[in-house]
Structures are given as C-alpha cells and as structure tokens.
Image (cartoon, coloured by chain):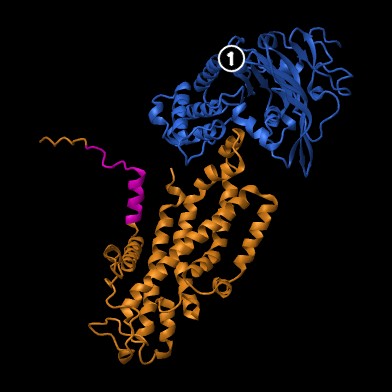
Chain colours: A blue, B orange
C-alpha cells in the first residue's frame, strides 16, 4: 500500500546575490511515499540541501527565495503556507537532522532540556512529562543509562552519541517525514553504520518516511530504497536502488559509480573520474547542465535541457542519449 | 654496595572539578579577594546599620547598631566638632554624627548601585537581544537609539532624567539605570549576532521554534555570562555616578544621608572642618575600589579560556 506523503513539483529556489542570481534548485519533482527511505545523492553544491530546506522554508529570505513549484504535504502546499503554519509543520510533521553533531546542540543546556523544548512547544507537555518522554526517546536511540544521561551536557557525549541525540530530538514529536541532511558525513565509518542501522530500525518501528541526503554512494547502498541523483540543481536520474547501481542510465550517475573505490576492483584497475567541474550556478548554461562534461553528449544536449522521463518501470532519467546504444532515445 | 630501589610514586597532580578550578583561580587573585572582603564588609555595615530585623518583630522603630547614633539627630551646639572617642568621625554642619551618616549612606549607595545595574542591565540586554536577533528595521531603530543615548556623558544624562522626574531614591535608580543600559545593549547586541549564527539555532528553527522562544532558550543563556561580568564591573560606576549626582544636589532628599550630599555639605568648611567632606569621600573611594576589584576578578574567572 503506497500512500503518497509528499509530492514536490517543479521546485525552484534562487539566491539573489550582488554577483548575480544563483540558480540553486531548478525545477525538481519527486514523490515520497509513506514509510519509504529515499536518498538524494549529488556532489557538494548540487542543490540537495537547499532543495529540502526549501520544503520547510528554512532558506534565509534575503538572499534566497523559493521562486517556483509546489510541495504538497497532507493536502497542503508547504510553499504557500503562512509563517505560523509552516512553523507548526517543522518538528511536528517534518523534522530534520543536520550534518555536524558537534555544533548542532546548545552547549549550555542539558540535552534533556533541548529535547524537551520541542515536546513542550508542539505537544504541550509539562516539564516533568517532557523529561520523562526525553528519557524514553534516549532509550529508543540506544543511549545507555538514559535516566542519568538526560541531565548531561552535550560536551559529555561523543559525536556518534550526539547524532543519536539529534535523531531523538527530531523524532520527539513523531513526524511523518525525517529529513537527514548528511547525518553521517562528519562521523567515522563504524559509527556511520550504527546510525544507518538505527534509522532503519526506527523507520520500521515508527513508520516515518526518510529523505537521506548524502554524497556517499556507499551509504546510499546501505540505506535507500529509492535514489534521486542531483546535478547542478536538477534531478538527473531517479530509480530503485538496485536499478541505479546495476542499470544506471545517466552518464553522470555512471561516472559517479565508476569513481567509487570497490573491493572487487582488480588491483591495477584505475578509478574513473569525471573530467571538468560542475557549472557555475550563476551562469548556468542552457540545455543539459552536464553536457560540457559528458562523453555521450550529442548536438541536442547543450541546446535543450532534457526532461526527467521514465525509461523503465520506476526508473526515470533526464537524458537525450541511451547509454546502451550511444544514440538518441 | 647496593642502591635503594627507587619506588614508583603515585601521580602528583590532582584532578579537580570545574567549580574547584574556578574557586582556585579566584582565590589566587589577591586583589579580587581584597575587593570581595571589602565589598562584603561594606554590605554588612549597610545591612546592620540598625537592628531592623529585631525591631520588626518587636514592633518598634529600629535603633542604631553598627551606626552609633541617629543619623538625623541634630545638635546645634556641637556642630563641626572634630573626631573624638564618641564620634569617631566627628560631627557635620548640623551636628549630626558623621560615622552614623556614613553607615546609613552605605545603604543608599549600595542599593542604588545594585538596583540601577540590575535595571539597566535587564533593559539593555533586552534591547540588545531583540535588536541582534530580529535584525532589519527593528535592529536599526533600537541600536541608533542606543547610539544617541551613549552620546551623552553619564552625568549629563543622569541630570536630564532627574530634572524631568525629580529627586528620590527610586528615580535615582531609574536615572542611572537608563544611563547604563546602552552599554549593556551594545554588548548584548554583538554577542547575540555571534550566537545566532550557531548551528543549534538553525536546529531549533528546523524543529519549529519561534523567534522569541529561540531568543529566550538559546541566545539568552549563552550571553548571560558576559552580561553578569559586565554588570559586576559597572556596579562601581553606578555607585560613583550616584555620588556625583548627590554632590551636585540631585540626590535623595534630606534627611536621608547620602555620601555625595555629605561631601557637598562639607565643602564650605574644608579649611576648618575637613573631616566633614573627607570621610564620605573616603567611603566612596573604598567602595568604588572594592567593587572594581571584584568586577575585575569576576572577569578573570569568566574568561572564555576557562570554558570547557
């Protein structure tokens, strides 16, 4: 039973700077179903963070602005809600965890206090009830001796534990969607695995949908069910995770996969890298944003931007070229 | 010939908690200790000037305790008497015991000093917080007002406020509070600008916290340390300003003794009865010095390098 929770259509976000208009997000569309884990992959600066922050309107209004598109969540367009309503959505319906657990917590407040804030504001719990619930949440994310730890300060926790605390905070009001913006990038690999496992378990227990943003294709393989690949503000490919890895249809995705170090590569096989650099988002060329670096590019590519269209069941690509044949679709 | 084996000794350092470390730093600071001791003495003198805490239960007027005489009792025959064993600081122009007036005057100075800093600190911090976090036009309006207020020398400002409001203890506290608030506003403003860039503020926003909740829960606790240090340093200034305003005649109404007023009354007799102005002057000196030292000591302790 797939119930669509979030439907994003042609989301467009721009930043108006003295140097020009930065086209950070250029018409991305996707849907998120209940209980689904979707990953958004892309290199730094491709618009993956800005894209999700636009949904809950965390983009600083000058200089940024959501300039187009819609984001339907539970029947309402998030992008058109007034300030008070979107504030109610944040934390309660859609919650977010950020990249750096070392700075995400206020150093002068106990973590119990910080978790309780959301509970008091959104769920109307009183101090005692909130504290009790905070302990329960800490236990849920496997913080040992939660009853004692709830009154500790952030500096008394390690990075991995702080990220768990962040997850506890984000899930405190039982949101429908958890957005994880590179939550494990700042952590070492073993802790990363623990966090991934934790989020999956919580999804199984609580049923929330997850949008996991990362630049690490290895993590994607471990957690996602569906993947959207972003490049220069657009989604270039969207597929089920196995399809993406086995039958990548976009040259950029193919290049990304080729650049991954793998255990099963032969010793002297070299990693492939993609020549060139991502485009300047102020001076975004017409046509496909990847065309300048693409080894499969044809005449049409730099002139006309390809739309994101299905090429197989639940597999969409924004490309004029069929990778298998090298010719136009 | 065999040597004694060297025995392994236990580590010679001792792990201490943060509180212990803070106490050690304060105690190592001799001048801060002197300041603290002096300030405490002055406070005790002021509190126990008379026996109000017993008199209250007995339903009578308080009688002098640390003070030796009624500070308002005049004795025209003995005016300007030199210090002796009974009146160790002599008598003033109305024959009132100087020592007793100094003791009661401490109440005025300390209460004005502490209350005006509390008022100015609260007011200024609020202005700085709101201006710093909200930004935009609100910030402009508030901070330009602060600039205007700061342009006036403290005495002129105090003078203007009292000229409008009239004399009296409460009005004095208000006046000096207003004089002090711009400094607190400036510091709170810049501290807020720094704090609001922190990630945990973004996190709070992402969880749906409104602006005032964030200011209250996240920004304020992080700037409180700085504001407390500022407050302790400015108590000395507040006391000095009160003395100055009393000296030029805007102090609390007679017969309540105030040090600045006492100096003023003695200026005509500097050649024949210098003690009338001298002792209140010394009182101001010692008090301001004491609070300055305490403030400096607190600043040394709360220096960021001691933060975990």
Chain containing the residue with disc 1? A
Question: At which x and y percent is residue A292?
Answer: 81, 24
Image side of residue B52 versus residue B157, left or right:
left
Q: Toward the viewer: A10 or A227?
A: A10
Split into 4 quadrants, where in the image is the C terminus of chain B? top left
Q: Toward the viewer: B229 or B3?
A: B229
Split into 4 quadrants, where in the image is the N terminus of chain B? top left
Please determine whether, in this image, residue A151 is positioned above or below residue B233.
above
Residue at the image position 46 percent from the left and 55 percent from the top:
B228
Q: Toward the viewer: A210 or B77?
A: B77
Question: At which x and y percent is residue A52?
Answer: 68, 28
Q: Quadrant of residue B58?
A: bottom left
Image side of residue B157 versus residue B28, left or right:
right
Please determine whether, in this image, residue A318 is positioned above or below residue B236.
above
Indicate whether residue A51 is drawn in magenta.
no
Residue at the image position 89 percent from the left and 19 percent from the top:
A300
Q: Which residues are magenta?
A: B9-27
What is the count of numbered marks? 1
Please determine whether, in this image, residue B1 is positioned above or below residue A172.
below
The residue carrying mark 1 is A222
Indicate whether residue B20 is drawn in magenta.
yes
Question: At which x and y percent is residue B19?
Answer: 35, 46
Residue at the far front in the pictured view: B59
């Amino acid at each position: 039973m797939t119930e669509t929770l979030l439907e994003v259509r042609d989301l467009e976000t721009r930043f108006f700077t003295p140097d020009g208009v930065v086209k950070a997000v250029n018409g991305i569309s996707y849907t998120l179903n209940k209980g689904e884990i979707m990953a958004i992959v892309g290199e730094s600066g491709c618009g993956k963070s800005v894209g999700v922050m636009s949904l809950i309107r965390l983009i600083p209004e000058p200089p940024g602005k959501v300039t187009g598109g819609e984001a339907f969540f539970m029947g309402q367009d998030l992008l058109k809600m007034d300030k008070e309503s979107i504030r109610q959505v944040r934390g309660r319906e859609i919650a977010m965890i950020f990249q750096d657990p070392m700075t995400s917590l206020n150093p002068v407040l106990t973590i119990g206090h910080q978790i309780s804030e959301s509970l008091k504001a959104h769920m109307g719990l009183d101090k005692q009830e909130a504290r009790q619930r905070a302990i329960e949440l800490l236990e849920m994310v496997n913080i040992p001796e939660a009853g004692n730890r709830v009154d500790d300060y952030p500096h008394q926790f390690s990075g991995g534990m702080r990220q768990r605390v962040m997850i506890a905070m984000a899930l405190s009001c039982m949101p429908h969607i958890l957005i994880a913006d590179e939550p494990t990038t700042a952590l070492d690999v073993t802790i990363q695995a623990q966090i991934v496992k934790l989020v999956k378990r919580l999804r199984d227990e609580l049923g929330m949908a997850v949008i996991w943003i990362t630049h690490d294709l290895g993590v994607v393989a471990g957690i996602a069910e569906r993947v959207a690949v972003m490049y220069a503000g657009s989604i270039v490919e969207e597929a089920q995770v196995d399809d993406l890895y086995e039958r990548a249809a976009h040259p950029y995705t193919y290049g990304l996969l080729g650049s991954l170090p793998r255990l099963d590569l032969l010793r002297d096989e070299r990693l492939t890298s993609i020549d060139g650099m991502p485009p300047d988002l102020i001076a975004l060329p017409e046509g496909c944003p990847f065309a300048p670096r693409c080894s499969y590019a044809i005449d049409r590519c730099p002139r006309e931007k390809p739309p994101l269209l299905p090429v197989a069941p639940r597999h969409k690509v924004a490309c004029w070229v069929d990778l298998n044949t090298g010719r136009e679709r | 010939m065999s040597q004694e084996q060297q025995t392994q000794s236990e580590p010679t350092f001792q792990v201490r908690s943060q509180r212990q470390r803070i106490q050690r730093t304060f105690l190592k600071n001799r001048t801060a200790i002197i300041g603290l001791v002096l300030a405490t003495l002055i406070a005790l003198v002021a509190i126990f000037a008379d026996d109000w805490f017993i008199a209250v239960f007995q339903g009578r007027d308080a009688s002098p305790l640390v003070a030796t005489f009624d500070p308002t009792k005049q004795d025209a025959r003995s005016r300007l008497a030199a210090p002796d064993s009974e009146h160790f600081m002599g008598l003033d122009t109305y024959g009132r015991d100087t020592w007793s007036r100094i003791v009661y005057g401490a109440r005025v100075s300390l209460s004005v000093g502490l209350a005006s800093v509390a008022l100015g600190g609260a007011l200024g911090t609020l202005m700085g917080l709101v201006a710093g976090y909200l930004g935009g036009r609100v910030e402009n309006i508030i901070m330009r007002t602060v600039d205007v207020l700061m342009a006036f020398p403290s005495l002129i400002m105090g003078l203007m406020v009292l000229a409008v409001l009239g004399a009296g203890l409460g009005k004095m506290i208000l006046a000096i509070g207003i004089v002090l608030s711009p400094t607190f506003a400036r510091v709170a403003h810049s501290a807020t600008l720094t704090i609001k860039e922190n990630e945990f503020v973004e996190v709070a926003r992402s969880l749906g916290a409104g602006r005032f909740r964030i200011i209250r829960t996240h920004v304020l606790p992080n700037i409180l340390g700085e504001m407390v240090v500022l407050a302790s340093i400015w108590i000395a200034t507040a006391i000095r300003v009160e003395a100055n305003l009393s000296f030029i005649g805007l102090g609390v109404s007679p017969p309540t003794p105030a040090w600045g007023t006492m100096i003023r009354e003695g200026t005509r007799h500097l050649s024949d009865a210098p003690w009338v102005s001298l002792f209140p002057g010394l009182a101001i000196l010692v008090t301001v010095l004491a609070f300055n030292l305490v403030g400096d000591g607190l600043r040394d302790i709360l220096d960021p390098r001691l933060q975990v």
